[in-house]
Image (cartoon, rainbow, N blue to C red):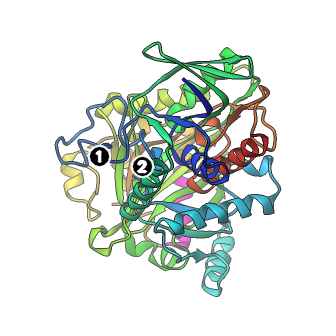
């Protein structure tokens, strides 16, 4: 089989690459290879109510399939160059913002809301001032919240559109090997089948980060270690952060700890949301999302507190390090652990009895335990210091019954050398999205797909 373009991965980056290619060159022969299911057959047994705990489906329907890990997220799009990835290392800031706005316009075409939250309002500036008074830094951004249910509907609409454009999808398909051949690339699938393409776009998503690094080594591509983000997901009554989330929806707050000088950040804030488990390469980690429909909301807000680790020589396995930390949580609790903040400070393990007395009711069925046995002391100290800092601008954050779920890990592939068109050292091979180590969010992932697609379209 021969194609003009083969896209590996049907996550946000791969989907927007396909959309833009078919918009610019409607007659292209494109295939998208995805190890998960299509949008209609992605089903997590926990979400469906068939089981209480993760049974490690392979591949995980929360992480893999059309729409990628973002399909069951709450669909937050951040219009900024300050966070969400490293595309700003390759593109001019205004060009990047234009790409993000373009991705948003596509979302709107397929059903997204036009409502946008912003840090550029009097109320938001008052929050920023209060944060600065307490050595916290509110990053500037516009934010759009699609909602988990609306996000899934938008992706379904895009999926149907791409099928109508004769885009070929191959689901439950794993690529074992990428080889450079005369005039293009040959992909070898797990069943031994091969297909050739003139251009290859690798968009493996976060759960494909390790796979992508292995393929880069085989191809002899130079790589630089990327970071791994480790931390916990915090859950507390929504009223604690209501005065902030009602204004900016998702507040990205940075804090440099006094004890170690490390940076801790809030990430993926979900007002009235739900804490969820996800499976990454057989390891159960924690995440969160929130619905747009008020009837589906909880009484809690959840968000991640993450500490970034960027390792230097001689250590070069940040992905493996993150997996090891996550495995400790799985070993102790069979999955995600949850602990009350007050118990953590007292140095006692949260058990079923203590959890039963908590005023904050958990939205995830996690195992009560002791996170100090999982996260390294330095990470734990950083997170505790951050919680006390947040308590100064959102009193109640450091309450005894604030819940901490662990662990939350954000994996990013080792980053390879790329041009501003996101082309690797091998002509015709492009790398995009979170799994390629250049983005860490929906907006920049989609933007990276559009950038690569436009570069390919110019050459066809």
Work out whether residue 29 or residue 315 is closer to the camera in this orientation and state it: 29
- Of all residues, the one furthest to the bottom in this rendering is 122
Q: Quadrant of the C terminus?
A: top right
Residue carrying label 1: 350
Would you call the spot at circle 1 few (<14 residues within 10 Å), some (14-19), or many (20 or more)? many
Residue 6 placed where, x, y %?
59, 32
Residue carrying label 2: 287
Residue 204 placed where, x, y %?
55, 35
Q: Is 308 situated above or below 314?
A: below
Would you call the spot at circle 2 few (<14 residues within 10 Å), some (14-19), or many (20 or more)? many
Question: Which residue corresponds to the image point at 62% horizontal and 80% vertical from the top-left?
Answer: 124
Question: Which residue corresponds to the image point at 61% horizontal and 45% vertical from the top-left?
Answer: 27
Give the number of the mark in front: 1 or 2.
Answer: 2
Work out whether residue 36 or residue 48 is closer to the camera in this orientation and state it: 36
Looking at the image, can residue 211 be seen?
A: yes
| In the image: residue 155, left or right of residue 254 | left
Measure the C-alpha gap from mark 1 to mark 2.
20 Å
Q: Is 354 situated above or below 271?
A: above
Q: Is residue 380 found inside the magenta-colored segment of the image?
A: no
Start-end of magenta stretch: 383-394
């Amino acid at each position: 089989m021969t194609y003009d373009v083969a896209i590996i991965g049907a996550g946000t980056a791969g989907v927007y690459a396909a959309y833009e290619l078919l918009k610019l060159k409607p007659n292209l022969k494109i295939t998208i290879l995805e190890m998960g299911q299509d949008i209609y057959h992605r089903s997590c047994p926990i979400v469906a109510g068939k089981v209480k705990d993760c049974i490690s489906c392979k591949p995980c329907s929360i992480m893999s399939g059309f729409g990628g890990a973002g399909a069951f997220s709450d669909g937050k799009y951040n219009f900024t160059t300050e966070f969400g990835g490293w595309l700003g290392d390759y593109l001019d800031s205004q060009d990047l913002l234009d790409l993000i706005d373009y991705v948003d316009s596509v979302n709107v075409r397929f059903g997204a809301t036009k409502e946008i939250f912003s840090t550029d309002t009097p109320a938001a500036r008052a929050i920023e001032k209060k944060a600065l008074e307490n050595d916290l830094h509110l990053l500037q951004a516009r934010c759009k919240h699609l909602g988990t249910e609306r996000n899934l509907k938008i992706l379904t609409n895009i999926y149907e559109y791409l099928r109508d454009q004769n885009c070929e999808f191959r689901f439950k398909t794993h690529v074992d090997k990428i080889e450079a051949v005369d005039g293009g690339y040959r992909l070898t699938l797990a069943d031994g089948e091969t297909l050739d393409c003139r251009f290859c776009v690798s968009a493996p998503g976060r759960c494909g980060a390790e796979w992508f690094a292995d393929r880069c080594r085989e191809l002899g591509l130079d790589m630089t270690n990327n970071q791994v983000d480790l931390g916990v997901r915090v859950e507390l009554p929504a009223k604690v952060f209501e005065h902030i989330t009602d204004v900016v929806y998702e507040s990205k707050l940075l804090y440099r700890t006094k004890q170690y000088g490390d940076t801790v950040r809030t990430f993926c804030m979900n007002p009235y949301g739900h804490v969820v488990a996800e499976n990454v390469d057989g390891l159960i980690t924690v995440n969160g999302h929130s619905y747009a429909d008020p009837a589906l909301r909880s009484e809690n807000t959840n968000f991640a507190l993450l500490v970034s680790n960027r390792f230097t020589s001689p250590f070069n396995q940040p992905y493996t390090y993150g997996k090891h930390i996550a495995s400790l949580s799985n070993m102790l609790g069979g999955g995600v652990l949850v602990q009350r903040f007050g118990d953590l400070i007292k140095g006692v393990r949260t058990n079923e009895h203590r959890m039963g007395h908590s005023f904050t009711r958990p939205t995830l069925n996690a195992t009560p335990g002791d996170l100090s046995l999982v996260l390294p002391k330095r990470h734990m100290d950083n997170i505790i210091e951050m919680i006390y800092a947040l308590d100064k601008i959102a009193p109640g954050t450091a309450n005894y019954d604030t819940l901490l779920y662990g662990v939350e890990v954000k994996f990013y592939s080792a980053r390879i050398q790329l041009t501003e068109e996101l082309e690797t050292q091998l002509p015709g091979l492009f790398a995009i999205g979170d799994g390629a180590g250049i983005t860490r969010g929906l907006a920049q992932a989609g933007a990276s797909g559009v950038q690569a697609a436009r570069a390919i379209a110019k050459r066809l």
